[in-house]
Amino acid sequence: MTVKYSPGDVQELLGIDSNTLRKYATLLEGHRYHIHRNNRGHRCYYENDVITLRKLIEFSRQEGRTLEQAVEEVMVWVSQESKTAVVTEVVPVETTIDQDKEHVPIEGTNEHDSNHAELLERIEHLEQINLDLIKYLKEKAISEAMQEEKLNEIMKYVKRAEQLEEERYKVIEETKKQIAAGVQKKWWKWWK
C-alpha cells in the first residue's frame, strides 16, 4: 500500500513552510527526481519522497554546503538507495525462509505452532490497521477534495466580485465625465 501525502501533510511532517517545500521539490525535479503530480498538476508525495526531502534537509544543514550541493548528494543517495532497496527486499525473504526450515524443531512442534499462530494473529491485526488507515485516508481525501472544490467556488466569486467592482468603477468614471461635460456647456448651448 502506497500512501499519498498532500503538500500540507509534508510541510507538517518536515516542519517547513510551503515556499520551502516548493523550492526543494523544484530543485529535485531539476535534477530528474520524479515527484508525482495529479491531473490538475499539483504535487503529491509518497513515503519515499518524504524520506528524500528529509535527507535533503539533513544534507543542506551541514556546514559549508550549498543547497545545490545538498541536492546533488541526495540524488546520489537516492540512486544508491534504489539499488540497495532491491537487494534488501529479496535477501531477507530468502534467508528467513531458509532459517525457518533449518531451525524447526522436530520434537517441539507445539512451539512452532504457537509461533505460527501468534504471527498469523499479528498479520491479521496489521491487516485491520491497514484497512482502518485506508478508510481514514479515503475520508481525508474526500474531505480535501470537497475543501478544494469550495475554495475554487470562493475564488470564482471573488474573481466575479473584482470584475463587478471594476465595471462599477468604470461606470462611475464615465458618469463623472458626463457630468463634467454637462457643467461646462452654457445654458444657451444645450440645443447644439
Image: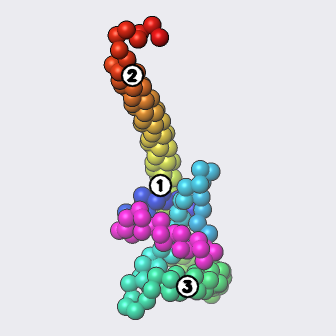
Secondary element type, mark 2: helix
User: Residue 143 versus residue 26: which sits nearer the camera?
Assistant: 26
Which of pointers 1 and 2 lies earlier in the amino acid sequence? 1
Numbered label attached to residue 133: 1
Give the dominant element type of the magenta stretch: helix, strand or loop. Answer: helix
173 versus 75 height, above or below: above
Looking at the rendered structure, the kind of residue marked 1 is: Leu
Distance between the alpha carbons at the discs numbered 3 and 2: 68 Å
| Percent x, y of residue 65 | 43, 89
Numbered label attached to residue 169: none
> How many neighbours does mark 1 have within 10 angstroms: few (below 14), some (14-19), or many (20 or more)?
few
Distance between the alpha carbons at the discs numbered 1 and 2: 71 Å
> How many neighbours does mark 2 have within 10 angstroms: few (below 14), some (14-19), or many (20 or more)?
few
User: Residue 175 versus residue 111: which sits nearer the camera?
Assistant: 175
| Percent x, y of residue 8 | 42, 58
Which of pointers 3 and 2 lies earlier in the amino acid sequence? 3
Residue at left 47%, top 11%? Answer: 192
Looking at the rendered structure, the kind of residue marked 2 is: Ala
- Disc number lying in front (3 or 2): 2
* Residue span colored magenta: 13-33
- Is there a contact, CB below 8 Å, between mark 1 and mark 3? no
Which of pointers 1 and 3 lies earlier in the amino acid sequence? 3
Looking at the rendered structure, the kind of residue marked 3 is: Glu
* Residue at mark 3: 72
Left or right: where 25 falls relative to 182: right
* Residue at mark 2: 181
- Asked if residue 150 can be seen in this view, the reply is no
